[in-house]
Image: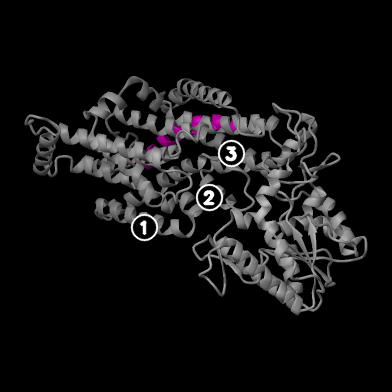
Amino acid sequence: MTLNQPYLSHPKYRPDIDGLRAIAVLSVVAFHAFPNWVRGGFIGVDIFFVISGFLISTIIFENLDKGTFSFSEFYSRRIRRIFPALLLVLIACFAFGWFALLADEYKQLGKHIAAGAGFISNFILWNEAGYFDNSAETKPLLHLWSLGIEEQFYIVWPLLLWFAWKRKFNLLTITIVVALATFMLNFKGIKQDMVATFYSPQTRFWELLSGSLLAWFTLYKKDAFTGIKSKIDVWLSLIVYSEKQEGDGKTLANVLSFVGLFLLLYGFWRINKELSFPGMWALVPVLGAVLIMTAGSKAWVNRKILSNKLAVWFGLISFPLYLWHWPILAFARIVESEVPSRNMRLAAVVLSIVLAWLTYKLVERPIRFGKSSKAKVVVLVLLMAVVGYVGYSAYKKNGLTFRKSLNNVSPPIEVMGEDDKKSHDICLNTYGLSNSNIRYCRLSTSGNKPHIALIGDSHAAALFSGLSKALSKNNEGLLMIGGRLFIDVATYPNGSEFEINVYKGGILATNFIANEKSIDTVIMVSRGPFYINDGWNFYLVNDKKTTNKIEIFERGMRNTLDLMMAKNKKVFFLIDNPELDFDPNKCQDLRPLSSKRSFDCSISRSAYDARGKEYRKLVLNVLKDYPSIVMFDQSAYLCDEVRCRFKSGSSVLYGDGNHLSIAGSEFMASHLMDVLSGGRSRLLN
């Protein structure tokens, strides 16, 4: 076998596969632009996976069999296919983001550009997903996660097949074993960590390998089981037609394609982002695509619908259309600071189609199908490396903050900062808690143990900067420690590993504070309305049968307060700050590109009261039984009888939809200090 032979044979062109690509890309575009219209449109990505697995594996199987497989030619073709359009989109995003994004957003875009250039977007997005992750709709390169998985497949699969072929292993067996293994990882993983299962290549490869299996049978077993297929065809024709038909396979092919199309339509209608996906649900689009492709180009659906000139045209521009549509929609949302209007989303879709056609016509096609040369490939690789480096540089330089002077924008809102590892470790080591899974640990002083502790979840962490600064004026220190608030409330074991550890660390931290002799004053903060109304499924450690969230919250709160009282702690319980239903960046004229220049930075008091009604009722009912505990109601300083407002002068008090900014932390701390120093709590009944 010659591995450096420059020419690879390719499968015969099938217009129906381009038509299937059209269905895939248009469903994704429709879902992103109008999610309420096509709730399951995102399964178009799974259709793409099957098509890619089929075409790539056909090339590999066929050329290994002929002895004409060449790694250099294989990857050169991949580079000429993928790099031109991707480079154009990455550069366009970087350029537009220069004028449209704030520093923290541009920093994240830089990271995503570097990840996209390195085809590891799925891993980066996987690591970002979580409690503090900003809205997916504001990540212009979010969609590159699927391209990352495909490229990782293109790296792993040819090497594995070549290795197996060299050792004369059965390639069908290898394909089946790997496909089953990755499917089982998907099946098990969806129950443990849905985010990891969504983004991991090892839980997605089975979808591409479904196309690989189809490729193998198409190449080597196309005429297998002819007798059985003929009998099935005759039997189906008796059901479908009034007169007996010749067993020529057409009826079977038509049934397969219609069933496949039905599965795809069912998936677009039934599957939605609230379901555990991929998991078993991913079988619907995968099987649908496999059946349609198995039916062949002569089946009625494939011939009349998928091979239609318009469908084929959309299939031809499907890759650049996929690349363009999401950044345009995401930037529209960013500029609008809210979901764009229907007309704007329609315009974004039209613009995406125009740019996709121009990209295909002027960039992709000339480079991909023009004269092949090593120089062309080398230039594309170097350009991708440069773009990746520029993106990474923007990330490392914190989003190129000097742009604000160029763009004449205000400084961004100072959001709550995460612990750095060094200060976190110093804090834990001070109390002998090193190597614990405590989520937050911050000390405002070094060396001395303060007598005031701030405990709870991220809302306590958001208050730390302002409160520690206020206390320092009185030469007081502050310890912030926690993850979750109550001593005996944990998330279910089927939650993500991260959340399980956060709850365990929170229980450990609260128990520690109760028993720590240097602490005599405890300030408690928890995002109560979220846990009661939304949140994760959680339970009482000693009572897993109780499922009512309000009852769990109340009993957890009482058990925690009882412990603090038993240890003679002075307790201040803070009712959580209101949550926003908008991006706080809208409260300032920050963006150089924005369609709106004024915004009422507030929500109605009635909306806040409605969301927090059960939580407030619960807290007031519990605290009646603990007269020594001082309640501090944060809404009393943010709300009047009509509105809750989130600016103090020119300062925006929130960093995101529910966490106080640094300015907000200082604002709230200034009022809390009155209470800590002997003032009375402000109650709103």
How far from the left and from the top, in percent, is residue 512?
71, 75
* Residue sitting at x 64%, y 40%: 110
Q: Separation of disc 3 and disc 1 at Cα? A: 31 Å
Please report whichever mark, 1 or 2, sits nearer to the chain's N-terminal start. Answer: 2
> Do labels 2 and 3 touch, CB within 8 Å?
no
Q: Horizontally, is 319 left or right of 463 in the view?
A: left
Look at label 3 and name its amino acid.
Answer: Glu
Query: Is any part of residue 622 visible from this angle?
Result: yes
Element marked by disc 2: helix
Give the amino acid at mark 1: Met
In the rendered image, residue 561, in percent from the top left (x then y), is placed at 72, 72
Of labels 1 and 2, the one closer to you: 1
Per the image, the residue denoted by label 1 is 184
Give coordinates of residue 176: x percent, y percent: 28, 53
- Identified by mark 2, the residue type is Phe
How crowded pointer 1 is (Cα within 10 Å; few <14, some 14-19, many 20+) is rated as some
Instruction: Identify the image quadrant of residue 41.
Output: top left
Up-down relation of residue 386 to residue 506 (above or below) = above
Q: Is residue 489 left or right of residue 358?
A: right
Q: Is residue 291 left or right of residue 330?
A: left
Q: Residue at x 30, y 25 (%)?
A: 305
The image quadrant that residue 591 belongs to is: top right
Q: Which residue is mark 2?
A: 123
Q: Which residues are magenta?
A: 69-91
Q: Earlier in the sequence, mark 2 or mark 3?
A: 2
* Dot label at residue 340: none
Q: From the image, which quarter does the N terminus lie in?
A: top left
Q: Residue furthest toward the right?
A: 474
Q: Is residue 73 left or right of residue 538?
A: left
Q: Say few, some or many: other residues with alpha carbon within 10 Å of mark 2 (under 14 / 14 to 19 / 20 or more).
A: some
Task: Check residue 137 in the rendering and tell me which mark sits there, or answer none.
Answer: 3
